[in-house]
Image (cartoon, rainbow, N blue to C red):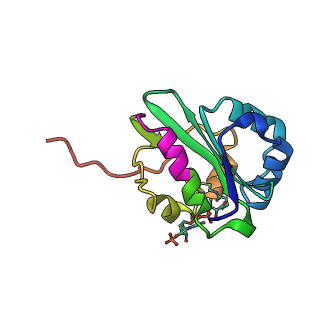
C-alpha cells in the first residue's frame, strides 16, 4: 500500500471532498455540514489520501470506556480491493482499544468484509431510525413483527 498518507485529524478535512467520496464509494448522500458535525463529535477518525486526494475515511463515536461505534467507512472505487478498507477498520479498532464493545452495522452485502475483521453478529441489536421505511427497504431493519432469534425456554 505504497503512496497512501494516513491522518487522524479532523481539522484538516475538506468536508465537501469527504461528501463527494461518500457519494462515489457509494455510501449515499451525506451533506458536508452534517459530516462536519458527526466527525467533530467522534472520538476517533481515520483518513487516507493518495497524491493529496481523499480516497478513504472512517470514524468511531466512543464514550471512552464502554462502547465505540464505527461508521462512515468508505474507500474510493479506484482504490477498493487493495486492503485500505480493512486497514481503516483495524486503525479505528486499535484506537478504540479498551472499550468493552466496538459495534457497527454493515451495509447489506458487506457482512463478510466485517466478519473477516473479527466482527460477530449481534443477535439482539435494536434501533430507532429517523426514516424507517427507507431502512426497511434497504434491508437494514426487520419489520416490527419479526420475532428475531428464538430463545430456549427458561427451565
Ligand atoms: C466496504 C469497503 C469499505 C471495503 O473497502 P476495500 O478497501 O475495498 O476492502 P479491502 O480491500 O480491505 O477488502 C478486505 C476484504 O473484504 C472483502 N470485501 C471488500 N468489500 C466487500 C464487500 N462489499 N462485500 C463483501 N466483501 C468485501 C474483500 O474481498 C477482501 O477479502 P479478502 O481479504 O478475502 O481478499 C468498500 O468496498 C466501500 O467503500 N464500499 C462502499 C461503501 C460501504 O459499503 N461501506 C461500508 C459501510 S457499512
Asked if residue 103 can be seen in this view, the reply is no
Of residue 12 and residue 78, the one placed in the foreground of this image is 12
Asked if residue 33 can be seen in this view, the reply is yes
Q: Please give the count of numbered marks on the rendered protein.
A: 0
The residue that appears at 60% across and 59% down in the rendered structure is: 85
Q: From the top left corner, tell me how far across and down residue 116 is, in percent.
A: 45, 63
Predominant SS along the magenta part? helix
Q: From the top left corner, tell me how far across and down residue 66 is, in percent.
A: 43, 29
- Ligand 1: quadrant of the figure: bottom right
**Viewport quadrant of the C terminus:** top left
Q: From the top left corner, tell me how far across and down residue 40 is, in percent.
A: 70, 30
> Quarter of the image holding residue 137?
bottom right
The residue that appears at 36% across and 52% down in the rendered structure is: 149
Q: Which residue lies furthest to the left in this view?
A: 155
The residue that appears at 69% across and 53% down in the rendered structure is: 5
Q: From the top left corner, tell me how far across and down residue 89 is, in percent.
A: 54, 51
Q: Per the image, is 71 magenta?
A: no
Q: Residue furthest front?
A: 2
> Quarter of the image holding residue 101?
top left
Range shown magenta: 89-99
Vertical comparison of 76 with 7: above or below: below
Vertical comparison of 40 with 8: above or below: above
The residue that appears at 70% across and 62% down in the rendered structure is: 3
Q: Per the image, is 95 magenta?
A: yes
**Viewport quadrant of the N terminus:** bottom right
| Left or right: 115 in relation to 39 | left
Of residue 24 and residue 2, the one placed in the foreground of this image is 2
Amino acid at each position: 500500500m505504497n503512496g497512501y498518507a494516513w491522518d487522524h485529524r479532523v481539522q484538516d478535512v475538506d468536508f465537501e471532498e469527504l461528501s463527494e467520496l461518500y457519494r462515489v464509494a457509494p455510501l449515499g448522500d451525506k451533506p458536508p455540514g452534517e459530516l462536519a458535525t458527526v466527525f467533530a463529535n467522534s472520538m476517533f477518525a481515520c483518513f487516507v489520501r493518495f497524491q493529496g486526494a481523499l480516497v478513504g475515511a472512517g470514524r468511531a463515536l466512543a464514550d471512552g470506556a464502554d462502547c465505540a461505534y464505527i461508521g462512515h467507512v468508505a474507500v474510493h472505487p479506484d482504490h477498493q480491493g487493495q486492503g485500505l478498507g480493512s486497514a481503516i477498520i483495524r486503525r479505528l479498532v486499535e484506537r478504540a482499544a479498551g472499550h468493552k464493545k466496538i459495534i457497527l452495522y454493515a451495509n447489506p452485502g458487506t457482512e463478510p468484509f466485517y466478519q473477516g475483521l473479527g466482527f460477530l453478529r449481534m443477535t439482539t441489536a435494536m434501533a430507532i431510525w429517523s426514516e424507517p421505511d427507507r431502512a426497511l427497504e434497504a434491508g437494514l431493519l426487520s419489520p416490527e413483527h419479526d420475532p428475531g432469534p428464538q430463545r430456549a425456554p427458561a427451565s
